[in-house]
Amino acid sequence: MTAASGSPEAVVTDPPAPTWRLATLPELAGPTSVLWDVVSVDATHAWAVGSEAYSPEQPDDTGTPLILEWNGTRWARAALPAIAWHGRFDLVAADSPSNVWAVGSTAAAGPEDQVTHVLHYDGTAWREVPFPRGNGGNYELITGLTVVAGHTWVVGNRQSEVIIEQWDGRSWRSHQSPAECRTGGTSFGGMPNFCTVTAIEAFRPDDVWAAGNGAWQGFKGPLLFHWDGSGWRTVQVGINNQESSFEALAGRSSGELWAVGSRGFAVRGGGGSFEVLRDAPGGALPDVATDPAGVPWLIENSLAPSAALATYSNGAWVDMPAPQPPDAIGMSLHGIAGTPGSPLMFAVGAADLPTSPRYLRAVVLEYVPAPSTDSRA
């Protein structure tokens, strides 16, 4: 086409959009492999954790804990110390390529027989760090892990007790949960006061946020928890008298938090000011992450099973289908992570295979930035 001046008319096209794509993984041992969490500290250092060689027919004594590492080009198995227990890694967190932590537990016939294991990577080798067992036996449900400035935080629940453990570089220090969680009073229906903690995010050693829920006289619903260097306190976000909980937490700073939970709601804000967004995706929301601009991305799983990735844009949630392997009949995602200073993101989980019984294969999705359209590139 030629313009009136005789010069060719410029053709305007939309730039290629960023996309999620399946990553190539090393061969993993069957019949089932699953990845549960992922962390990325820069464009050439990321880790994903889970298990391989798990058999649903032998759940109590199969499963080999697995850590994969990303070097900017490919995913490969991390070299681990000799591991004599069957089970999996559930959580991974890091604040640098030389300070990476993974938490998992043994496979067992009952929860009372499970044991928590913690591994640390110092940039050279992975080593196990003994984890305190408490006074109530071995059973604990570890739900959150974060690392900042050499401090590592682990949260969860041991029976009805909230677990908050801080590694200060030399040893673990146990923290008390907020007073409302342990006063011995009664909540709705005469039930004892309680709190659960499902996720944690640290920005400084004296600025740490956790998420979950709680109930005591006059309150029942999702909660945030904040550590200011001297104690933990509960932070209500404007939702009360609801059977709901936050499941995941992320943000660039304590003033830019995103928390997502059951029943299709999300909260954004910080300090004492929060906005409740009640139109969040309604499926299971196991994890959320933010990109360098502070934009949230969350995982949405349905019972199909199928997985989608949703982001918040122009005042609304926008779903983006998650690609699955061509031979899969379904997929679930469990963890998502952004990369500081980079648009690169990762999501991990497992694809359902067309087998009987149903087996799973671990997957990693990479969020690939749009290619440059600059002809000088």
Image (tube, rainbow, N blue to C red):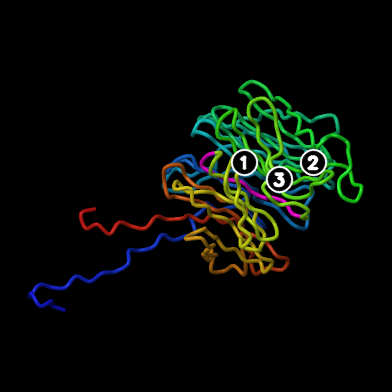
Q: Residue at x 16, y 79 (%)?
A: 1
Is residue 323 at least partly visible in the picture? no
Q: Are marks 3 and 1 in contact (CB under 8 Å)?
A: no
Q: Which mark is residue 258?
A: none
Is 182 or 331 nearer to us in this picture?
182
Instruction: Give how far across and how far down residue 319 sits, in percent.
Output: 53, 65
Q: What amino acid is labelled 2 in the image?
A: Gln
Per the image, the residue denoted by label 2 is: 114
Write the start and end of the magenta stretch as one range.
244-253
Q: From the viewer's perspective, is 18 left or right of 265?
A: left
Q: What amino acid is labelled 1 in the image?
A: Gly
Total tally of numbered discs in the picture:
3
| SS state under label 2 | loop
Per the image, the residue denoted by label 1 is: 272
Position above or below: 78 against 241: above
Position above or below: 232 against 247: above
Separation of residues labelled 3 and 1 (CA atoms) = 12 Å
Instruction: Give how far across and how far down residue 4 sits, in percent.
Output: 10, 78
Quadrant of residue 104 in the image? top right
Separation of residues labelled 2 and 1 (CA atoms) = 38 Å
Q: Nearer the viewer, mark 2 or mark 1?
A: 1
Instruction: Give how far across and how far down residue 129 sits, in percent.
Output: 67, 28
Q: Residue at x 51, y 51 (%)?
A: 346
The secondary structure that dominates the magenta segment is strand
Q: What amino acid is labelled 3 in the image?
A: Leu
Per the image, the residue denoted by label 3 is: 223
Q: From the viewer's perspective, is 7 left or right of 64?
A: left
Q: Residue at x 71, y 68 (%)?
A: 356
Asked whether residue 251 is drawn in magenta, I would say yes
Position above or below: 259 against 142: below
Instruction: Give how far across and how far down residue 332 sits, in percent.
Output: 63, 60
**Mark 3 neighbour class, 10 Å CA radius: few under 14, some 14 to 19, many 20 or more:** many
